[in-house]
Amino acid sequence: MSKARPKDPFSITADELAALTVEEHEELLKKVYELCKDAILRAFSENPDVVEVVVCDGQVVYMARELGEIDMELLKDLMSRYGKPCYVFGRPEMVEEVPWSALNGDWYPAVEFLVGSPGWNDQAMLERGRHVVADFDTGCPTYFLREEIARDIAPPPQPLEVRMSIHLGRSFFYFTRRIKIGIRDIVGAFRSAQAYVAFVRRWAESPMTLINPAREALVGRKLMFDLALEITLNPVRRATSMKLL
């Protein structure tokens, strides 16, 4: 950011905010988190079902219980109401379960699914959907995918759409998009559904790869609810089977 811009993230004008790059907005998010860390963590602690919060002028002014609830329209409405910039933060410290086995290297439960544009039907998903193999952790509240998976499926973020969260003690940045996810189960049945996911910027440098450097996505229990899905993990075969309900 240029030296002419105010150091206080909540004193930046609308014009200055609109002129920021994505990277400059990420730097602001870091500053806001340090300034408002207590309020942010208190909001998440007191509201376990909240997944994202909006901070304005040092206070948490909005809490979302679903990823995608805080869209650009809502964010601009809040900034108009309070007359100051607003910043979005995700729930910190998603749980990571213990790996399956430490023998000859760690093993992690994994699931495979397809992702595609939200307007695609099932046939398009089967023909054009992008295969994603994700680590599966029931403690994870949503979907976290590396940013490159969004290419040709979802548009890149505008600066104000970038959010910040903390995982394993380290910060990372992400943006949300509604996409379509789908799975073919053990008997060959296929089902897809629209869902909001978090695309993580600079995935390889993010804390998402600290546990498993080869990971390209991390998903949790929401996959089961969105697709009405039963997931069975077999630690002997180190295999995952999925059955649509």
Image: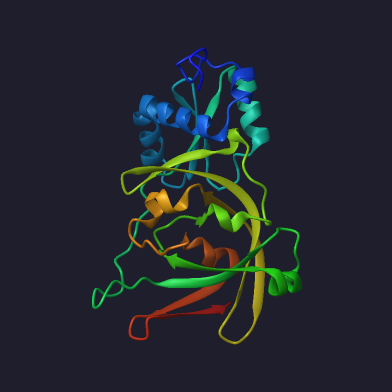
State left or right for residue 78 relative to residue 145: right
State left or right for residue 205 relative to residue 153: left
Where is residue 186 drawn, in percent x and y? 56, 85
State left or right for residue 34 relative to residue 73: left
The quarter of the picture where residue 75 lies is top right
Q: Is residue 95 above or below residue 189?
A: above
State left or right for residue 186 relative to residue 164: right
> Residue at (37%, 61%) from the top-left corner?
213
> Residue at (61%, 55%) from the top-left corner?
150
Q: Colour scheme of this structure image?
A: rainbow
> Residue at (34%, 81%) from the top-left corner?
235
Q: Is residue 191 above or below residue 195?
A: below
Where is residue 16 drawn, in percent x and y? 60, 19
Looking at the rendered structure, the number of numbered marks drawn on it comes to 0
Q: Is residue 138 above or below residue 112?
A: above
Residue positioned most to the left: 103
The quarter of the picture where residue 92 lies is top left
Q: Is residue 211 above or below residue 100?
A: above
Judging depth in this view, the residue of 109 and 45 nearest the camera is 109
> Residue at (75%, 70%) from the top-left corner?
124
Judging depth in this view, the residue of 175 and 5 nearest the camera is 5
Judging depth in this view, the residue of 228 and 20 nearest the camera is 20
Where is residue 148 drawn, in percent x and y? 57, 55
Q: Quadrant of the C terminus?
A: bottom right
Where is residue 123 drawn, in percent x and y? 75, 74
